[in-house]
Amino acid sequence: MKKQEALLYRVIDLFAERFDKHAVLHGGMVLRVLGCERMTNDLDYVFVPFKSKKDIVSDVVTTLEQLENAQVNYSLNSKCLRVTVEATEARIQLEVKTALEVPTSVVSTKDFAANYGFSARLIPVVDYSVALANKMAAWNERRLIRDIYDIWFYLKMGVRPNHATLKTRLSNPQYSRLVKKTERFQGRNVKEFFEFLNSHVQTLTDGEIADSLSDYLPPDGIPGLAMRFRAEIVKLL
């Protein structure tokens, strides 16, 4: 994991230098930069302002190829530009999307960068309230415990979801095949969704969390998480 994380940060640093405010980080790595314990092996970016993913393929791939001894492979689909990078005995994945605009916040990489000998940078990230709303919608569509973890982390930092973003996502969910029709959210508004989310979290156990996240969290970081999840998510009601 250390080699993977070092490679992840090399890419963050490179993108900050090359693309500046046009490369907006989102997803689990933002939480990692903010001090979250959950490890990740991928990076999610939104490039702005661009109409099409095709507009950024060449620049992204060429930039990644500047990494020493890196092997870069990519594919383009309807959802994103997906890139894998292998270097220094580590492998990571990037998913890059485009947008004409996106609300942003700014975060310093100071604490995270110091672990790997890089200088601190100020990087744009998707606005925290919008990111939390999207994370809640992602949980609804795929029901991954790591999404619950990320929701909890945002909530305990005092972030609350952007209701407009959440309402839009809930109105047109893209459900995973793993989510049965009988398990889909049937409510009509954000308040009912919070109740739906809370009902699921109330039954979650530390054992289930360990089964899902033991590769991504330190062993002593799991006991008691189920209770912590419940304590924060119930505050939404």
Image: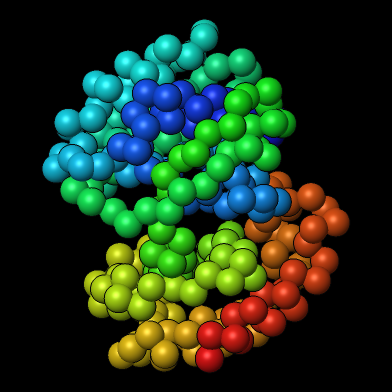
The residue lying toward the viewer, choosing from 110 and 99, is: 110
Along the line of sight, which residue is nearer the eye, 206 or 156?
Answer: 156
Residue 217 vertical placement versus 19 (above, below): below
Left or right: 52 with respect to 131?
Answer: left
Is 14 above or below relative to 236?
above
Residue 227, quarter of picture = bottom right
- Residue drawn at x 59%, y 86% as measured from the top left: 235
Q: Position of residue 169 (x, y in %)?
A: 30, 70
Name the colouring of the figure: rainbow
Name the foreground residue: 18 vs 223: 18
Q: Is residue 155 left or right of residue 175?
A: right
> From what the image shows, is residue 57 above or below residue 134?
above
The reply to whether residue 219 is visible in this rendering is yes
Furthest residue in direction left, as rendered: 51
The quadrant of the rendering that contains the N terminus is top right
> Could you tell me if residue 3 is visible in this image?
no
State the count of labels.
0
Who's the residue at 25% across and 42% down the image?
Answer: 48
Please name the residue shown 37% across and 23% down the image: 18
Residue 148 image position (x, y, % from top left): 57, 68
